[in-house]
Image (tube, rainbow, N blue to C red):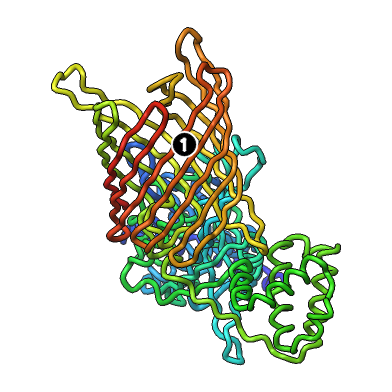
Amino acid sequence: MFFKLLIFHLLLLCSFRVHAETGEEVVQKAFQTKLYETLQWRKLLHFEPQGLFGHLSSQVDSPNFFLAPNGSDNMQSEMAADIRAFWSTADAAEPDRARCRFPARYMFIKQSLKSEIHQWPDGPCPRFEKYFDALRGVSVSLVFSSYFLNNPSSAFGHTFLRINKAPAQDGNRYELLDYGINYAANVDTSNALFYAIKGMFGMFPGTFTSVPYYYKVREYNNAESRDLWEYELNITPAEVDMLVAHLWELGPSWINYWYLTENCSYHMFTILEAAAPRLNLTGQLKKWVIPSDTIQVVWNTPGLVKGYYFRPSVRTELFARVKALDQNERRLLLELVQQRQFSEEFKRLPNKQRKEILDTAMDYMDYQYAHETQLPGPQTDFKNVLLNARSQINLVSEKLVIEPKETERPHLSHGSRRVGLSYIDDDKDADYFNLEVKFALHDQLDFPTGYPEYAELSFGDLNLSYTPSPQVNDRKVDLESFKFFEIVSHSPYSQFSKVISWQIKVGLEKIKDQNCYDCHAGLISGGAGYTFQLADAPLLTFFGGLKGQIYYTPYGSTPARFVPGMGPAARARLRLTDHWIMLAEGWYREDADVAIKTYQEYSLSTQWSPNKNWGVRLSGVDQEFDRHAKMDFYFYY
């Protein structure tokens, strides 16, 4: 018995020695082939040029993502540490077993050296295998969630991945059971100012999460009424397996979230490249990344998009159903959702008409009370009444098919950046030129395809003027304006969507009124009112409401002064075609704490866009102290 135990322990010791020696042998083989310099190893570690001098280091900020002390800066050291750990922890418990913690790296090294090394420390990893089996699929889709102006973090849209499972045994695809992969900031403040500062300077940790796709549909399609655009990518099943394994590696780690660069859209590309480095997606992005940019990159990459699918929001479905009703059915629908009871006239309708009204009423409840209908209460009770009434009509509801318009498709939109050159002719014979550079995104005169019809969003809009003169000393370059951001949301008011239109702007502008001509002032302006759609083809909308502004500037004998003012404002927008749009605006304001309190401004603008990349805009402005005509030439990229 003693000799048997001795032999057993000797064999076990030799086994450890073989593992250690084999681990060192793999390190040497990997170094001989310079495996640590390959593109996929670099992508698995998220190494990218950093800083002013382009030093190559990892974008992952969490130390638990590396085994080597200098692993975040040295790919060779990290590979050596990983390989040694694969062998030295081969018999450890799963949480401490390196190949279970970093399965994608293990898969990559094993696949790369399979002809060189024949003994590998394979073994079970139950926790990882459970995760892997739950997520693995046959393809991947990039999903774009449309613009949501009520949340600053989603104003530019949002992108995430969906891992598409194989068809079920009955041959059908159940997309809601797929998994959505998201990267987002772990926000620790509800203060808008702190959120903006911390998001701009990478002060939030960003993490990857994976949840069933129906959670994402409920969040975006239902709760926030955002349309989803799903672009299936040409990714092989083996690359999908590598993607899932890499997501497991990233799970406990974090990457500092930078709102303009390393954001949700950017890191969807980095994890795709880790699984399929052949794609080279991040190399096609601009320095500052916007979700719509990523959609255009995948769409314009030859052979990458296999197809796309539009998943309408509950709001889109509601208005499609309302449009299909006749005038009397709409009246009965409105009575039903307002009075919360079935009228005698409704009860006398044929089953088909009652079915259509009830289907629309349930969509109305889901749209107007997205959160309330998830909890006990009067809204949930009334929705149950509708469901019960619908169940008593033995007619199947046809699947609602909504074909999106050409102008709604985000992959066909103009570039998110805009540069412009302008010539201004004013009534003082002081003609000058403007140079405009806008970081993002869209205004209501731009080519409309792919952007919200009734909204505009500007961020980082810089406008410089140049006044020529025969005298060199009289030539002048000056700042006309800088918009930190401007948001306009003018969705039309209707019986089924009683939304308030609003707008806000924060920036620095040159004031041109009777109290201070050509004074630079920091300002905040905003307003609210209602927008009404007056015609459908051509599309005509009208906004009316109140608009106010507060600006701060030093002038005259006073070192500095805040000037508040408010008054009625109106705007009419006419989209004659996708290429030709007109806009008329007026604003009358009463200012406080200045000598001349009355201010009024009227403008008329039109833009013709021969295609999505170019635009020519003509405008005229009439203020009490400044009248000018302007011609702009814009390029979008």
Residue 540 in the image: state x and y as whole percent.
47, 59
Give the secondary structure at mark 1. Answer: strand
User: Is 436 left or right of 10, judged from the image as shown?
Assistant: left
Q: Quick check: 487 left or right of 224?
A: left
Q: Is residue 480 above or below residue 97?
A: above
Between 30 and 458, the one nearer to me in the picture: 458
Label 1, on which residue? 484
> Quadrant location of residue 491?
bottom right
Q: Is residue 547 left or right of residue 232?
A: right
Q: Residue at position x 63%, y 61% from top?
A: 494
- Regarding residue 359, the answer to whether it shows in the image is yes
In the rendered image of this protein, does residue 185 appear above or below residue 221?
above
Nearest the camera: 113 or 633?
633
Q: Position of residue 321 (x, y in %)?
A: 62, 75
* Disc 1 crowd, CA 10 A, few/some/many (<14, 14-19, 20+): some
Residue at horizontal 54 percent and vertical 41 percent from the top: 569
- Please tell me which residue lies in front, 566 or 263: 566
Q: Position of residue 262 (x, y in %)?
A: 47, 48
Residue drawn at (30%, 38%), measured in percent from left and top? 629
Residue sticking out furthest to the top: 557
Q: Residue at x 60, y 59 (%)?
A: 209
